[in-house]
Image: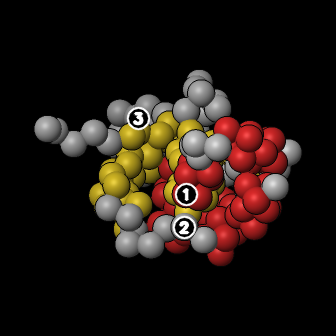
Amino acid sequence: MKDITACLWFDGQAEEAANLYVSIFPNSKIGDISRYGDTGPGPKGSVMMVTFELDGRKFSGLNGGPMFKFTEAVSFSVACETQAEVDHYWDSLIADGGQPSQCGWLKDRFGLSWQIVPTILGKLAADPDRAKAGRVMQAMLKMVKLDIAELEAAARG
């Protein structure tokens, strides 16, 4: 199968965003950077496209202009094993102008939506004991940043 690469549309911040993301995620790096030439449409010499990898997953950032904005209809979900991972990704992505939402969702300072989700949530929510699963879901629905200890406490009742 051919590679599938997410292309993120920015209004002049593609390189800044790529640098932020590679600083947050392990095993990440900036790839190629192409620049606008004499024919534009961006200012000559400014970044047109930056490629980058986040823990081995390929992305492209395009400085396409102000016409299109990110929406919550597309988000990136980050599975976290520990509360320390949840805290790291959450705090790093909302820093410098990001916005927390609810149920583990946030927008970074570029407006891109992320879900920072502990892996235990899926296990607890799928528990065959439907009362336990219901308590976990009710607890999660009240949270902004997800808290593993609170989810586990809800599961215990």
97 above or below 137? below
The reply to whether residue 103 is visible in this rendering is no
Q: Name the residue under label 1.
A: 119
Foreground disc of the pair 2, 3: 2
Q: Is residue 67 visible?
A: yes
Give the CA distance from mark 1 to mark 3. Answer: 45 Å
Residue shown at the point (64%, 43%) measured from the top left: 129
Label 3, secondary structure: give it. Answer: loop
Residue 84 percent location from the top left of the image? 65, 75
Q: Where is residue 133 in the image (x, y as percent from the top left)?
A: 68, 43
In the current view of this chain or complex, which residue is farthest to the right?
Answer: 142
What residue does disc 3 label?
Answer: 40
Q: What residue type is labelled 2?
A: Glu
First in sequence: mark 2 vs mark 3:
3
Whether pointer 2 and pointer 3 mark residues with C-beta atoms closer than 8 Å, the reply is no
Between the C-alphas of marks 1 and 2, the distance is 6 Å
How many C-alpha atoms fall within 10 Å of the one at disc 1: few (<14), some, or many (≥20)? some
Q: Mark 2 points at which residue?
A: 81
Residue shown at 40%/39% (left/top)?
7
Tell me which amino acid carries mark 3: Gly
Q: Disc 2 and disc 3: Cα gap in Å?
A: 45 Å
Q: What residue type is labelled 1?
A: Thr
Say which quadrant the C terminus sits in: bottom right
User: Would residue 87 appear left or right of 99 to someone viewing this image?
Assistant: left
Give the foreground label among 1 and 3.
Answer: 1
